[in-house]
Amino acid sequence: MEHQYTSRIFWTGNLGTGTSGYKDYARTWDIAISGKQIIHCSNDPLLGGDSSKMNPEDLLISSLSACHMLWYLHLASDAGITVLEYEDSPIATGEVLKGGAGRFLSAVLRPKITIPEDTNLESAMAIHHEIHKVCFIARSVNFPVHYEPEFVISNL
């Protein structure tokens, strides 16, 4: 079954003269999807962007991490594993070539997952290796994604 996803991207960086010169415009835009909050974005600071705004690279690594998390929670629930907390600090490595072309080389997801003390750690760990089979984003990227999970045992 096919799904469609839509978005509206609009440039907000016209400083008064459009793209009349390379330094005459800002690399900012908004993402607007009907019924959702607008996300203000910019280019990567290395390429003249505003470091206070999300850039495409931030959005990609965040999407990859969020997709992994959602599938982890789903599969953990199916396996009878209770997850009490989940947070991730993913990191992606990229390269930019002389002409400005860039790409991601790899990503590492580093989830910190809090589970009850009676949880089977081997089963909890094994879930990470099943997610790449089903995660929409992970199945769509063309760079390797590695996992370095940390489990925190809760006495609750």
Image (tube, rainbow, N blue to C red):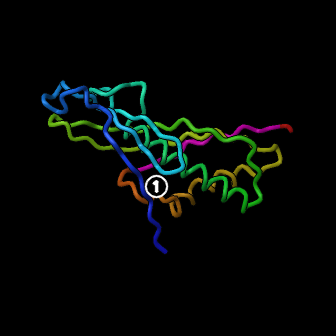
Left or right: where 124 falls relative to 64: right
Q: Residue at x 48, y 40 (%)?
A: 38
Measured from the top left, where is residue 63 in percent x and y? 48, 47
Left or right: where 27 falls relative to 156: left
Left or right: where 1 falls relative to 16: right
The amino acid type of the residue labelled 1 equals Ile
Measured from the top left, where is residue 116 in percent x and y? 80, 44
Q: Residue at x 77, y 51 (%)?
A: 82
88, above or below 47, in the image: below
Extreme residue toward the right, this view: 156
**Residue at mark 1:** 137
Q: Looking at the magenta stretch, what is its main secondary structure?
A: strand
Q: Residue 13's image quarter?
A: top left
Q: Does any portion of residue 106 appear in the rendered image? A: yes
In this rendered view, identify the residue nearer to me: 107 or 52.
Answer: 52
Q: Residue at x 83, y 48 (%)?
A: 118
Extreme residue toward the bottom, this view: 1
Left or right: where 37 falls relative to 117: left
Q: Does any portion of residue 43 appear in the rendered image? A: no
User: From which residue to which does the magenta span run?
Assistant: 144-154
**Quadrant of the rendering where the C terminus is positioned:** top right
Q: Residue at x 50, y 38 (%)?
A: 90
Residue 150 falls inside the magenta stretch: yes
43, above or below 82, in the image: above
Measured from the top left, where is residue 25 in percent x and y? 23, 28
